[in-house]
Image (tube, rainbow, N blue to C red):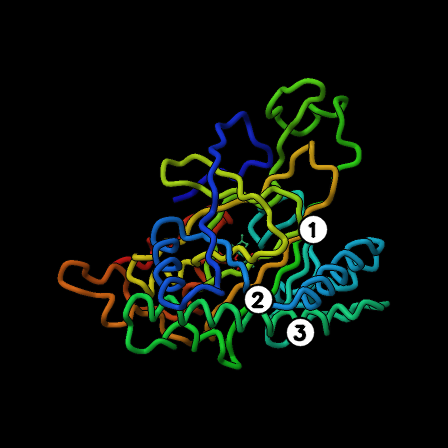
Amino acid sequence: MVVASPTSIQNEKIQPFELPIIDLAEERSIVMKNIVKASEEFGFFNVINHGVSNDTITKMEEAGFDFFAKPVEQKKLAMPIGDSFGYGSKNIGINGDMGEIEYLLFNASTQLFRTISNDPSNLRSRASEYTDAVMNLACEILELMAEGMGVPDTLCFSRFIREVESDSILRLNHYPHDHNNNILNINKDCDIGTHNSPSYNYTKVGFGEHSDPQILTILRSNDVDGLQISLQDGQWSPVTPDPSAFCVNVGDLLEVMTNGRFVSVRHRVVTNSYNNKSRMSIAYFGAPPLNACIVAPPLMVTPERPSLFRPFTWAEYKKATYSLRLGDTRIHLFRN
Ligand code: GA4
């Protein structure tokens, strides 16, 4: 299905909704039950008492802000050489999607991209430390999920992202605060959102709607809002940012590996004129190695719930993902 990829958003009904909160300090059996329920119902939840040190998070965020504060010419030195890793601005992917965003993409295992010159904040080493910490958190969550669903091989999901060859990604997103954003430029290239006195507000697309193709995403943002998830009735719901929590979401591959029990839910990031601060988010996308075969464990497939998807490799799925637009759905291409 091809969907339009708007750069601004018309008046839309926004539905208030609170993400389920998973407290990893609670008793294991309760945590497992709650994680499975949240993954089935919403595909999204917040994790608190996650064990990732504040120091690791703060240093990563500071290094990210330092990088994005550099002059654009310097940031461009981190532009990708051949693959898509490195600095990017406005362009998302390779098929013409755009957003009010600048970002830095790292291969989580190699942190490879062109040299960042003048890097006093040690972005690379911060990213490496941060990636290790969130990868371990992702594995813990995936193991709780498997155990919570009664799968005997509790490492069946986490094993993929622990592999040295794992194709996981770390992404730093910076949604700059628009300083020129005022009543005079309101009709320039955007639609009017809400029309509240004393000032007009409008909404632009920071990162257009999409689902994450990988297994699991671990997202941390500063205290600036913008993330919205698509609820079952098609309405958008804002996610209140909680810098002390990680927002976790199910990716397409996990939907496949749970034979459709868990849902990979569409989400987007909007930038609002009433935000007076930049939003920074740091997303870890846990992915398997390229040659990994994606298939649901036997317990997920029953006569009542026959296999929904054909087996495929991550390389095949990734190829399909990158050949499509951001907002296109791809999972249906792999249905039985
Ligand atoms: C969405 C999730 C991750 O940010 C990402 C994105 C990737 C990119 O920015 O290069 C994609 C997008 C994401 C899905 C569709 C394709 C690929 C942009 C795009 C238009 C890094 C990923 O893995 O898939």
Residue with the mark numbered 3: 129
Q: CA distance from mark 2 to mark 1?
A: 16 Å
Residue with the mark numbered 2: 169
- In this rendered view, identify the residue nearer to me: 187 or 27: 27
Judge: label 3 CB < 8 Å from ligand 1: no
Q: Which of marks 1 and 2 precedes in the sequence?
A: 2
Q: Secondary structure at mark 1?
A: strand
Q: CA distance from mark 3 to mark 1?
A: 20 Å
For this orientation, the residue located farthest to the top is: 197
Residue with the mark numbered 1: 174
Amino acid carrying label 1: it is His
What is the number of the mark on residue 79?
Answer: none
Residue 88 location (% of width, % of height): 69, 55
Amino acid carrying label 2: it is Ile
**Residue under the image location 53 percent in, 59 percent down:** 48
Q: Secondary structure at mark 3?
A: helix
Camera-side mark, 2 or 3 = 3
Q: Is residue 279 left or right of residue 184?
A: left
Judge: label 2 CB < 8 Å from ligand 1: yes
Q: Quadrant of ligand 1?
A: bottom right
Counting other residues with Cα less than 10 Å from the Cα at mark 1, is it few (<14), some (14-19), or many (20 or more)? many
Image quadrant in which you'd find residue 131: bottom right
- In this rendered view, identify the residue nearer to me: 184 or 325: 184
Amino acid carrying label 3: it is Glu
